[in-house]
Each structure stands twice: as C-alpha cells, then as structure tokens.
Image: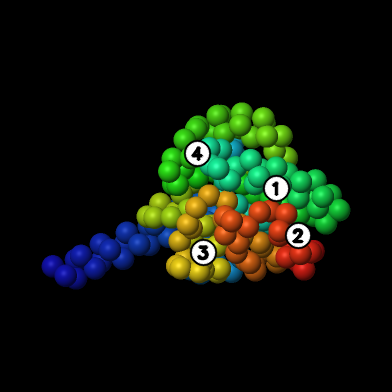
Amino acid sequence: MLYVCLYRFNILTLAIAVVAAMSGNKDYKSATSIYDFTANSIKGEEVPLSNYKGHVCLIVNVASKCGLTPTNYKELNELYDEYAESKGLRILGFPCNQFNGQEPGTSEEICTFADRQKVKFDMFEKINVNGDNTHPLWAYLKKEQGGLLGNFIKWNFTKFIVDKEGKVVERHGPNVDPHKLKDSLEKYF
C-alpha cells in the first residue's frame, strides 16, 4: 500500500512540475533568475519575465486600500518618471488581497484605480504572495531574499530589487518608501 501511495505521489508531483513548466513557470526552487517565470498582466495576457532582460526591476506587491497606498503609488510613479527612460528601470506591480482585504477589486477595478493614480509602470493580475497558492515568482523572490523574521511577506508594498541579470539583489519592507531606494537602484544601473 505504501508503494502505491508513493507512486501516486510521484506521478502527481511530476504532473504539477509539467503543468508549471508548460505555463512558463519553472519550479521556484530550481529557478536561476526571474526570467524563468511568467505572470499575467492586469489585462490577462501572459508575460514572460524574460522580457525584462537587461533592465533593473523593482517588484512590489501593491494594494489600493492600504494606508501606505498614496505614498507608494506616488513615489513609484516618480521613480518610473526619473529612471525608466534614462536608466531602464522597470517597475512590476502585483496586486495582492492577503493583508486585511486591502485589494478586494477585480482586475478591471484595479485598472480603474491605477488609471486614477496615473500609474505608468506594469501592473499584473492579483496574486497570492504567501500560503499554498503563492505565485511561483514570489516564492522565488522570498527564497532569494528572505525577510528579517521569516521569508513570508509581512504586508503590502514589500519591494524586491532585481539586477539586469534577473537576480534578486535586495528586499525592502513596506516601511521603506520608494524614494529611499534611489541609492540602492543606482548601484545596479
């Protein structure tokens, strides 16, 4: 009986790995860069993160109803204005509703909110950053740059800096405003 269970477990594990590979998402444990992943844009289109090769990226879990939202959206836009053209910075916003339900909307509602905020950076579909359904990219980000009290994401607006080779080089907590990342970003341009 144990042999049958192990056999079924191995078949299931293989099937999960095949589905992940077919969707463009490598198992986060064996990934070597963010370029091993895909994510759906806020419009539902699959985006290979290899599209960001050669760019420094700032990856952020965002929310529209958080106390940190006004400052973060404003300053993320300002960073984009300052560095997107001149230095090639790319900002990837991933809505997440795992923290006090502060991103409850649909993709369409999130788009409307982002339009009101005059967001210029890339927005993706709502994802989970913790738990059993964590998006593989976020599992990888957390593995590469663990947090102070554990690898889990503690709140909205956790920020990861990724260098031009797709390597996760820094992690910053929600309490770090985007403007405070300028010196860090400059190191990788």
- Circle 2 residues within 10 Å: few <14, some 14–19, many ≥20: few
Residue at the location (64% across, 35% down)? 114
Residue type at numbered disc 4:
Glu
Q: Are marks 3 and 2 in contact (CB under 8 Å)?
A: no
Q: Mark 4 or mark 3: name the one nearer the start of the chain.
A: 4
> Which is closer to the viewer, label 3 or label 1?
1
Instruction: Give the spatial CA distance, label 4 vs label 3.
Output: 21 Å
| Three-letter code, disc 2 | Lys
Determine the residue positioned at 47% across, 57% down.
Answer: 154
Could you tell me how far apart the alpha carbons at marks 2 and 4 are, in whole angstroms?
A: 27 Å
- Mark 4 and mark 1: span between their CA atoms? 18 Å
Residue 42, quarter of the rendered image: top right
Which comes before the other along the chain, label 2 or label 4? 4
Residue marked by disc 2: 182
Which of the two residues, 8 or 184, is positioned nearer the viewer here? 184
Identify the image quadrant of residue 1: bottom left
**Tag 4 residue:** 103
Alpha carbons under labels 2 and 1: distance apart: 11 Å
Question: Which secondary structure, mark 1?
Answer: helix
Query: Please, what secondary structure does the residue beneath circle 2 have?
Result: helix
The local secondary structure at tag 4 comes to: loop
Asked if the residues shown at circle 2 and circle 1 are in contact, with their CB atoms under 8 angstroms apart, the answer is no
Name the residue beneath numbered marker 3.
142
> Does the image show residue 150?
yes
Q: Which residue has dot 1 on it?
A: 76
Q: Is residue 149 above or below residue 126?
A: below
x and y, in percent, of residue 112 in the image: 61, 28
**Quadrant of the rendering where the C terminus is positioned:** bottom right
